[in-house]
Image (spheres, helix red, strand yellow):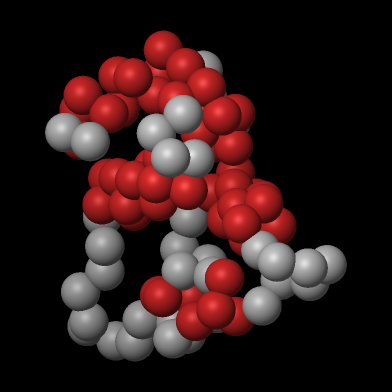
Amino acid sequence: YPWPGNVRELRNLLERAVVFGAGGEIRAEELPAQVRQGAVRGGEARMSLEEVERGYIAEVLDHCRGKKGRAAQILGISRKTLLEKRKKYHL
């Protein structure tokens, strides 16, 4: 799968899979749908970075049951940055 993002995004994806995963290994069902389905081919539409970021933040917040401090820690950003992104994405 040709990773469309940068190394930090890949690291965050893997950390998320470890945190949300059950057990000692990362399973395919713990990865985002676009990764499970493989590379986007040819002229198919890709998600924008903002769409990916919004979706990821929403997933983390849901997993943390709205606990912003824990969500910010998982995301690797400050609580203030998380609050700004929540406002930006209307989360």
Q: Quadrant of the C terminus?
A: top left
Q: Residue at x 43, y 40 (%)?
A: 65
Instruction: Please say whether residue 12 is visible from this viewpoint.
Output: yes
| Residue 23 pos. (x, y %) | 78, 68
Instruction: Please say whether residue 2 is visible from this viewpoint.
Output: no
Q: Nearer the viewer, residue 17 or 34?
A: 17
Q: Is residue 39 above or below residue 59?
A: below
Q: Quadrant of the N terminus?
A: bottom right
Q: Residue at x 56, y 29 (%)?
A: 70
| Residue 88 pos. (x, y %) | 20, 28
| Residue 64 pos. (x, y %) | 49, 40
Q: Residue at x 59, y 37 (%)?
A: 74
Residue 44 is left or right of residue 78, and the answer is left
Q: Is residue 62 above or below residue 10?
A: above
Q: Nearer the viewer, residue 67 or 42?
A: 67
Q: Nearer the viewer, residue 28 or 48?
A: 28
